[in-house]
Image: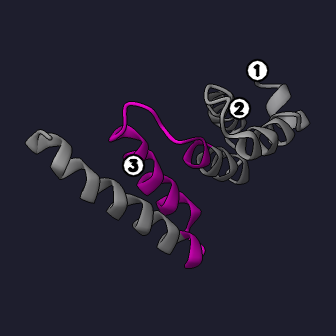
Amino acid sequence: MSKIANQSEPDYTQCIHGGNLQLKEGRPEDALKHFLKAASLRETVAPTLCLKIARLYFGLKDYQNAGSYCLRVAEDVGDFTSWLAASQLISKKEIKAQL
């Protein structure tokens, strides 16, 4: 494994952990920053992370980005639970208007 790959795993885990802590503290904007950083560290973003980001964007009334991350969930057809949750979120009128 390369040095870069070894360094990115702790960073990824720290970003996810930091985002979850920010959520618990009621700071969705800061949580979103952590989760977006985690997503940038991976070539393929996990559907569960895409869904979490989509929900945060939706809560912040950024419907265009919420829709974009919902669509990214569909890229991984193996995670039906995330796909189903994303399909319910993307069907909301606020997101539909942005797509």
State if disc 2 and disc 1 touch (CB < 8 Å): yes
Residue under label 3, please give it. 38
Circle on res. 67: 2
- Residue 35 lies in the magenta stretch: yes
Circle 1 residues within 10 Å: few <14, some 14–19, many ≥20 = few
Residue sitting at x 90%, y 34%: 93
Q: Residue at x 53, y 58 (%)?
A: 29
For numbered disc 3, what is the local secondary structure?
helix
Q: Position of residue 19 (x, y in %)?
A: 47, 64
Q: Is residue 90 above or below residue 27?
A: above
Query: Which quadrant: the N terminus?
Result: top left
Q: Quadrant of the C terminus?
A: top right
Q: Amino acid at mark 3?
A: Ala
Q: Which residue is mark 1?
A: 99
Instruction: Answer with the quarter of the image where residue 18 lies.
Output: bottom left
Asked if residue 11 lies left or right of residue 24, the reply is left
**Whole-number angstrom distance, CA of label 2 to CA of label 3:** 19 Å
Q: Quadrant of residue 95?
A: top right
The amino acid marked with disc number 2 is Gly
Q: Which residues are magenta?
A: 23-50
Give the mark nearest the N terminus, 2 or 3: 3
Depth check, mark 2 against mark 3: the one in front is 3
Q: Are marks 1 and 3 in contact (CB under 8 Å)?
A: no
Q: Verify CB contact (< 8 Å) between mark 2 and mark 3.
A: no
Please provide percent x and percent y for residue 81.
Answer: 75, 46
First-in-chain label (1 vs 3): 3
Q: Secondary structure at mark 1?
A: loop
* Position of residue 33 measured from the top left corner of the image (x, y, whole percent): 44, 53
Give the CA distance from mark 1 to mark 3. 25 Å
Of residues 19 and 9, the one drawn nearer to the viewer in this rendering? 9
